[in-house]
């Protein structure tokens, strides 16, 4: 049966970084018609109601209906260690991350955390994500099984590491290739799931492992490949010492066939001119993880300089290096970091990054990330007055952006008034 969800609606007809806020489409009393899990129509509520009198109506009142948030870089296995104190990247990995990821050797633990992670993501209005698993194949199975049970569009891969990680958390070039290939064949394209080839980052992979994963990617070019790039200066120095032949950090991937369309690099903060040029020429995607960049002390992503180059840029929590599950909090952190570089990102740009931008970075923008006919019906309804502090500020707003910005800056899961996956209400 058709469903009609009514509220304020926010969609994008263009890119607000190119066109400004005029790229957005807002209706103060709009609606989304859902049929067979997809968006069948969008428009004014009264007109859609009259045209589809048999549709089941859900009236969200003054809440803002949008495409669900897309978290383009997350480590679901780090759910349990989010907000761990006092370390920078390499120490943080060794002190908190690796011991926790070791626990995923137990498939029951992996399933428990995957379920917990998806429940948290949905409660925060995140309807799709691209995750790293651990080196354990069962951690990938746990992630995809939990996404599949909820009907979600989700992407992930086995994290590959064959050096500089503790015993028990290392694979080999051959086992990384074999396990990744088997998981890819098992999950890629099943329901709404996609496999992502996932070397963790150059410090934890030998050139041989990177080469094997480059080979796997050439054999399956319709998969994405995700990894980390130039997050902290200490890490970049370490990469230099591990790969003395490489021109720069990106070259450690490029030399092994891990730079092409469909490559998704997390962080990409400290880039050289050559790296920027090659990333653009290759059609790669970058993912900005602002709460992680402040929490682990990494640096400030050059949003203004990179977003206009044609590179696909997504937004992400980077849970648990990031300090929040909320894409609202993540937008706020992106705003604050851009301010430190002298740029005020407009609310339309922040919202676009968390929806269309992340979908483009993951090359799923024809399926999710916007309210448009034919897209999969993954929606959020956002209460623009979810706490007294937010409500008293949005009450005096003169337009949508002024009404929305307090929720971007101060909102969390309390702002999520509804979530739909493939047209099914999840919360
Ligand atoms: N670089 C390599 N692994 C990780 C990780 O798990 N989190 C972050 N933030 N950076 C990384
Ligand atoms: Zn990461």
Image (cartoon, rainbow, N blue to C red):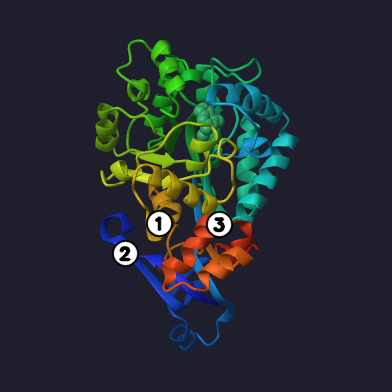
Quick one: label 2, few (<14), some, or many (20+) residues within 10 Å?
some
Q: CA distance from mark 1 to mark 3?
A: 18 Å
Q: CA distance from mark 2 to mark 3?
A: 24 Å
Residue position for label 1: 352
Residue 389 is labelled as none
The residue closer to the viewer here, 330 or 261, is: 330
Is residue 244 placed above or below 271 in the rendered structure?
above
Q: Residue at x 64, y 56 (%)?
A: 123
Q: Nearer the viewer, mark 1 or mark 3?
A: 3
Q: Under tag 1, what secondary structure?
A: helix
Q: CA distance from mark 1 to mark 2?
A: 10 Å
Residue position for label 3: 410
The percent position of residue 77, horizontal first and vertical second, equals 63, 36
- Relative placement, left or right, of 22 versus 294 is left
Q: Under tag 3, what secondary structure?
A: helix
Q: Residue at x 39, y 15 (%)?
A: 240
Residue 23 is labelled as 2
Marks 2/3 in contact by CB < 8 Å: the verdict is no
Is residue 385 placed above or below 323 in the rendered structure?
below
Q: Residue at x 28, y 33 (%)?
A: 276
State whether label 1 is within 8 Å of ligand 2.
no
The percent position of residue 361, horizontal first and vertical second, equals 39, 45
Q: Under tag 2, what secondary structure?
A: helix
The residue closer to the viewer here, 37 or 400, is: 400
- Relative placement, left or right, of 369 versus 122 is left
Quick one: label 3, few (<14), some, or many (20+) residues within 10 Å?
some
Let me know if residue 42 appears in the view.
no
Let me know if residue 82 appears in the view.
yes
Tell me where residue 112 sits by quadrant: top right
Marks 1/2 in contact by CB < 8 Å: the verdict is yes
């Amino acid at each position: 049966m058709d469903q009609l969800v009514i509220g304020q609606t926010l969609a994008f007809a263009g890119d607000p970084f190119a066109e400004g806020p005029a790229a957005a489409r807002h209706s103060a009393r709009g609606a989304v018609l859902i049929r067979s899990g997809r968006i069948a129509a969008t428009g004014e509520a009264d007109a859609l109601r009259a045209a589809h009198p048999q549709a089941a109506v859900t009236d969200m009142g003054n809440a803002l209906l949008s495409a669900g948030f897309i978290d383009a870089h997350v480590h679901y296995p780090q759910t349990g260690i989010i907000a761990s104190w006092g370390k920078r990247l390499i120490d943080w990995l060794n002190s908190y991350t690796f011991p926790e990821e070791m626990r995923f050797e137990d498939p029951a633990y992996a399933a428990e955390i995957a379920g917990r992670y998806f429940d948290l993501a949905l409660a925060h209005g995140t309807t799709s994500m691209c995750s790293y698993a651990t080196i354990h194949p069962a951690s990938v199975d746990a992630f995809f099984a939990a996404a599949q049970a909820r009907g979600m569009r989700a992407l992930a891969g086995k994290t590959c590491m064959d050096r500089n990680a503790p015993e028990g958390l290392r694979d080999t070039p051959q086992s990384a290739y074999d396990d990744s290939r088997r998981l890819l064949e098992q999950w890629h394209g099943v329901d709404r799931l996609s496999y992502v080839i996932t070397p963790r980052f150059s410090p934890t992979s030998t050139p041989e492992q990177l080469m094997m994963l480059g080979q796997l990617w050439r054999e399956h070019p319709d998969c994405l490949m995700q990894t980390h790039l130039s997050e902290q200066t200490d890490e970049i120095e370490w990469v230099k010492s591990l790969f003395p032949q490489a021109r720069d950090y990106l070259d450690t991937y490029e030399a092994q066939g891990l730079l092409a369309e469909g490559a998704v690099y997390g962080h990409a903060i400290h880039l050289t001119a050559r790296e920027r040029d090659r990333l653009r020429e290759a059609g790669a995607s970058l993912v900005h993880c602002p709460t992680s960049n402040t929490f682990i002390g990494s640096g400030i992503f050059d949003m203004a300089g990179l977003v206009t180059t044609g590179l696909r840029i997504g937004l992400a929590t980077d849970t648990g290096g990031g300090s929040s599950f909320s894409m609202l909090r993540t937008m706020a952190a992106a705003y604050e970091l851009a301010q430190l570089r002298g740029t005020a990102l407009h609310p339309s740009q922040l919202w676009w990054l968390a929806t269309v931008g992340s979908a483009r970075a993951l090359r799923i923008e024809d399926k999710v990330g916007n309210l448009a006919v034919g897209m999969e019906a993954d929606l959020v309804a956002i209460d623009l007055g979810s706490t007294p502090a937010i409500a008293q500020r949005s009450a005096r707003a003169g337009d949508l952006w002024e009404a929305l910005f307090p929720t971007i800056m101060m909102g969390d899961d309390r702002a999520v008034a509804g979530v739909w996956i493939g047209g099914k209400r999840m919360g």
